[in-house]
Amino acid sequence: MGPKPAGVNLDADVASRECSIKFVTAQCPAISAFLEGSQRLLTDHSLGYFCTLCMVNYVQLLIFSFLLISVCYSSQNSIMAEAPPVVPSEELLEWPKKDKRRFLHAVYRVGDLDRTIKFYTEGFGMKLLRKRDIPEEKYSNAFLGFGPEESNFVVELTYNYGVDKYDIGTGFGHFAIATPDVRVYKFVENARAKGGNVTREPGPVKGGSSVIAFVKDPDGYIFEIIQRGSTPEPLCQVMLRVGDIERSIKFYEKALGMKLCRKIDRPEQKYTLAMMGFADEYDTTVLELTYNYGVTEYTKGNAYAQVAISTDDVYKSAEVVNHVTQELGGKITRQPGPIPGLNTKITSFLDPDGWKTVLVDNEDFLKELGKA
Ligand SMILES: N[C@@H](CCC(=O)N[C@@H](CS)C(=O)NCC(=O)O)C(=O)O
Ligand SMILES: [Co+2]
């Protein structure tokens, strides 16, 4: 044999355990130094014959390596057995608050598109922003609001060919329109004159002071007309009833990065409200979550569908939602990705009560509007 049989053998030995040794040396500099030192002693030793010192060193090193590898494997196994579930990074959990988000539109079904367009434009003073017909899928959409879609929250009406009636259910509350000061009375009179069904005359809200009224549209959707100073976003609320207000607040804070703008408890009326949004309550649209004492279940019907919210990254957003649903309930109903044919990236999910939200990519949304 050549002059350095032990060295050759050692190299082979080390190579065959490369992963383990790398792991061990990476973990402990002292072990690393020992191994390197021993290896150098053996390989640099050039006496030209089979040396007892080499043999002793070699056997010692083999035993030592064997022990280390055993310890390392068993500790790795025990670490794996006790490994906690993957914890999302702080950066990921902070994402919803850093993202560029706003309410884009509320989506719901109506029995006659032209009838609703006429009522919303003449009775409420909304503008018809766009319309599209998708005959292959047998439905049409109309978008209406108080300002352009690039900056305002709007309604997206869906008409399914041949379906003229829907069940609104007991969970959906209302949309709200803010109108300045005493004009709330004029607003309601006009809506009534155009065929609106005023189910609650203007006057101070029970248990509070702001003046409100309720007007039902032709499909039975309620619009709360709220007296308020002038605002950049008159279409200001989507009210949904929930079964556990604290759970909902946590969900919308963590999954969507919303803030709790205002919480009102009215024990006399036995309900609690949480206004959740991305900006000041009076400058933007909020989700008005309502908890009626002791009521945990509502029906959803098939009329109201969802709200759409913008995001800069549907993939990252869905990852956060997925994590939050594991803690608080709800589920992803559409994995993030482009809509076939349209290429707009979206993801959608249900909150713990089953209310749906769709997140839409900011840039793709502007492209869809022809503004990017
Ligand atoms: N039980 C009510 C609780 C919510 C509620 O009462 N909201 C206020 C508006 S913030 C209201 O509708 N008040 C009726 C009134 O003042 O006549 C519901 O589920 O709609
Ligand atoms: Co309201």
Image: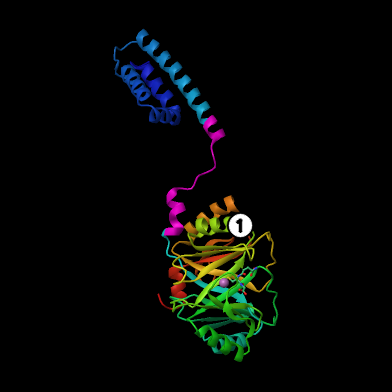
Percent coordinates x, y for residue 82 in the rendering: 55, 34
- Residue at the spot of label 1: 330
Residue plotted at (36% across, 22% down): 35
Task: Check if residue 123 falls in the magenta segment.
Answer: no
Label 1 residue SS? loop
Residue 347's quadrant in the figure?
A: bottom right
Residue 74 against residue 170 in the figure, above or below:
above
Percent coordinates x, y for residue 122 in the rendering: 55, 90
Task: Kindly report the secondary structure that dominates the magenta region of the rendered protein.
Answer: helix
| Left or right: 355 in relation to 255 | right
**Foreground pick, 192 / 347:** 192
Looking at the rendering, the quadrant in which ligand 2 lies is bottom right
Residue extent of the magenta highlight:
77-97
Q: Is residue 144 visible?
A: yes
Percent coordinates x, y for residue 262 in the rendering: 50, 63
Count residues near mark 1 (Cα–Cα under 10 Å), then give few for <14, some for 14-19, many for 20+.
many
Looking at the rendered image, the quarter that the N terminus falls into is top left
Residue 194's quadrant in the figure?
A: bottom right
| Left or right: 50 in relation to 192 | left
Disc 1 marks a residue whose amino acid type is: Gly
Residue 295 against residue 142 in the figure, above or below:
above
**Foreground pick, 324 / 26:** 324
Residue 154 against residue 351 in the figure, above or below:
below
Percent coordinates x, y for residue 225 in the rendering: 55, 79
Residue 134's quadrant in the figure?
A: bottom right
Q: Is residue 224 visible?
A: no
Looking at the rendered image, the quarter that the C terminus falls into is bottom left
